[in-house]
Image (cartoon, grey):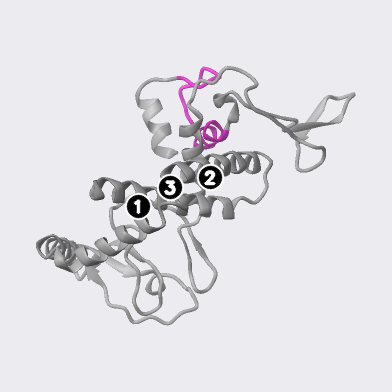
Amino acid sequence: MDRIAKGLEADGILTGAGKTKWWTSTINKILHNEKYIGDALLQKTYTIDFLNKTRVKNNDIVPQYYVEGNHEAIIPKDIFLRVQEELVRRRVVKTSANGKKRSYSCNHCFAQIVICGECGEMFRRIHWNNRGCKSIVWRCISRLEPTGQECHARIVNEMVLENVVVQAINTLLGDKSTYQAQLQQNIAKVIRSAQQNTADGINERLQRLQKELLKKANSKEAYDEIADEIFKLREQHEKCTVAFVLWT
């Protein structure tokens, strides 16, 4: 959202109020606003004092009503629903053993995918200055902040990490036999269950879940379970598509 705001400012696009400054909170509201897809959530706010016309946010004070197709849409619903799914995915990337939730970050390609083999925490990218020798390294979060876990994981230089990843990719691409057997098994498994899990059937289920997700999101209900099922169905749909292409 911060990058979107900076992009709008760089392009000279004004806010709805005619201001040049964009706030991430404004971007957040736009991304969640169902009005862009032609729907409307009624009674988002509630008048508590009719004399002073004081309105407050409706936190289960009075019923809310969701109206689909209330007006002409300016954004495809499919794109809007994908945004809602991504917002859910980014909300919590990993929950540590001590219960602390790590939020999403996209500052580096290795961010949140390098996991400590000793304590299970993520590695964090830091600029290291060791006796005047500057370098970029990755270090377990347990070594950087109190997590309640004792960890002895060593510091990893970023160049070493990059080389290891490149070697792993080259090894995988150079020896296809290591993953071809598993790929064939996956394809066969998908094809065997094609009658129960066809692409069309998955799409229908996705559409129903997306509508349910949208309604729950706008009514401030818990929708993590629905989002998780959507992610699983999308993966299943991709496998079905890949299997069909390779098989044909």
Foreground label between 3 and 2:
3
In front of the other: 112 or 240: 240
At 26% from the left and 66% from the top, the residue drawn is: 182
Distance in Å between CA atoms under marks 2 and 1 = 16 Å
* Residue 77 lies in the magenta stretch: no
| Residue 130: x %, y % from top left | 22, 70
User: In which image quadrant can residue 184 be found?
Assistant: bottom left
Upstream in sequence: badge 1 or badge 3: 3
At 32% from the left and 65% from the top, the residue drawn is: 114
- Range of residues picked out in magenta: 14-32
Give the secondary structure at mark 2: helix
Residue hosting label 2: 205
Give the secondary structure at mark 1: helix
At 65% from the left and 43% from the top, the residue drawn is: 216
| Residue 29: x %, y % from top left | 56, 34
Residue hosting label 1: 239
Count of marks, rendered view: 3
| Residue 188: x %, y % from top left | 31, 60
User: In which image quadrant can residue 93 be found?
Assistant: bottom left
Residue furthest left as drawn: 174
Residue hosting label 3: 198
Whether residue 61 sits left or right of residue 169 in the image: it is right
Upstream in sequence: badge 3 or badge 2: 3
